[in-house]
Amino acid sequence: MIHTEKLTNLQQELLKVFSYSLSEKQLIEIKELLSNYFAEKATNEMDKLWEKNKWNDQTMEDWSKEHLRTTYSENK
């Protein structure tokens, strides 16, 4: 069974731009650029959440002490 899904607009654009072979070094550099780009976007979104929710270092300290595991009954 062949499973086909439509490529995203990003995938399509990258295929057009990089329709030629790259050296291993270039490939690593591009992967790093993309990683840094998405890491920066995630960091910016987290900064917005911290500001919106007024989180601070004490919030992190409190979270580190929370016990959130689910308790399971031994009589299943």
Image (cartoon, grey):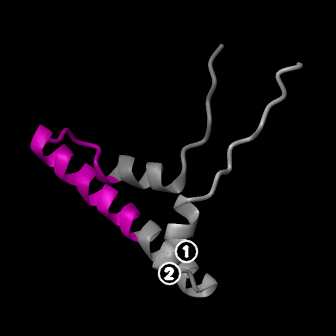
Mark number for residue 56? 2
Q: Residue furthest top?
A: 1
Figure check: 52 above or below 49: below
Which residue position holds label 1?
59
Mark 1 → mark 2, Cα distance in angstroms: 5 Å
Q: Nearer the viewer, residue 3 or 62?
A: 62
Q: Is residue 35 left or right of residue 65?
A: left
Q: Is residue 60 left or right of residue 30?
A: right
Q: Main secondary structure of the magenta part?
A: helix
Q: Nearer the viewer, residue 18 or 30?
A: 30
- The amino acid marked with disc number 2 is Asn
Count the numbered circles shown: 2
Which residues, given as a range, are shown in magenta?
17-40
* Secondary-structure class at tag 1: helix
Residue at image coords 27%, 50%: 31
The x, y position of residue 50, in whole percent, is: 54, 80
Classed neighbour count for the residue bearing mark 1: other residues with Cα under 10 Å, few (<14), some (14–19), many (≥20)? few
Q: Is residue 13 left or right of residue 7?
A: left
Task: Check whether the beta carbons of the residues at disc 1 and disc 2 lie within 8 A of each other.
Answer: yes
Mark number for residue 7? none
Quadrant in the picture for the N terminus:
top right
Q: Is residue 31 left or right of residue 41?
A: left
* Secondary-structure class at tag 2: loop
Residue at image coords 32%, 56%: 35
Quadrant in the picture for the C terminus:
top right
Classed neighbour count for the residue bearing mark 2: other residues with Cα under 10 Å, few (<14), some (14–19), many (≥20)? few
The x, y position of residue 53, in whole percent, is: 63, 82
- The amino acid marked with disc number 1 is Thr
Does residue 3 belong to the magenta stretch?
no
Figure check: 34 above or below 70: below
Residue at image coords 28%, 48%: 18
